[in-house]
Amino acid sequence: MLRKRILDGAERLLLKEGLDGFRLDAVAAEAGVSKGGLLHHFRSKQALVDGVLLRRVDEFDAFLPEPGDPPGVFTRAWLDAAVPEVAPETGGSHDQIVVVLLSALAGGSSMEILRERYETWQHKLAADGLDPVVATLVRVAADGWWLSHVLNLAPPQGLLYQQMRAEILRLLS
């Protein structure tokens, strides 16, 4: 429970202060724990950033089913996670924490955590019973949409959003 409390506090602080204000003593205060308690679970600032990232990646992973029957179930879940049926609002707290985590990927072990997880996901996509080219195209398209959304880089809206999602779904049929 203490680890969860620390991660919750770390996310709140990242949202309030960004990476510039992300110091271990500030996270400990935000989480209501001693700095020693924080250091027992996370030995460094990088380890804490990695912990936040890993928790978010694990949440995404938990949403995804195992590849299987019917073919494309994993690939469809990937699409649904990244490009939901209804376009979400940009700038929510989830988007904000993702932007901060993306900033943290510039260095340290966080990028390696993400690369390893993507390798696993790519293997699952390739084993999902679809043409691996199609499954990978869906992943790359969904990832591109998701990135444009969280960074607010002119993400598709309205009818264009719906048409784009329909075209990706067409690839899956």
Image: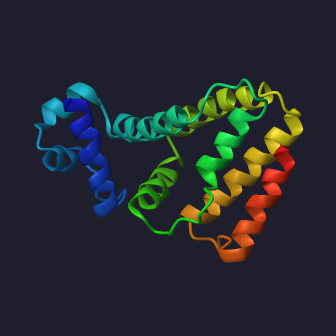
Image-quadrant location for residue 61: top right
How is colour applied across the structure in the image?
rainbow
Counting from the top left corner in percent of width and height, residue 22 is at 30, 52
> Which residue is located at x 20 percent, y 34 percent?
38
> Which residue is located at x 54 percent, y 62 percent?
150
Counting from the top left corner in percent of width and height, residue 149 is at 59, 64
List the single residue furthest toward the front: 70
Q: Which one is in front, 169 or 44?
A: 169
Image-quadrant location for residue 2: top left
Q: Which one is in front, 116 or 161?
A: 161
Counting from the top left corner in percent of width and height, residue 25 is at 18, 46
Query: Is 17 displayed left or right of 156 in the figure?
Result: left
* Quarter containing the N terminus: top left
> Which residue is located at x 43 percent, y 56 percent?
94
Counting from the top left corner in percent of width and height, residue 93 is at 39, 61
Image-quadrant location for residue 158: bottom right
Query: Is 35 displayed left or right of 109 in the figure?
Result: left
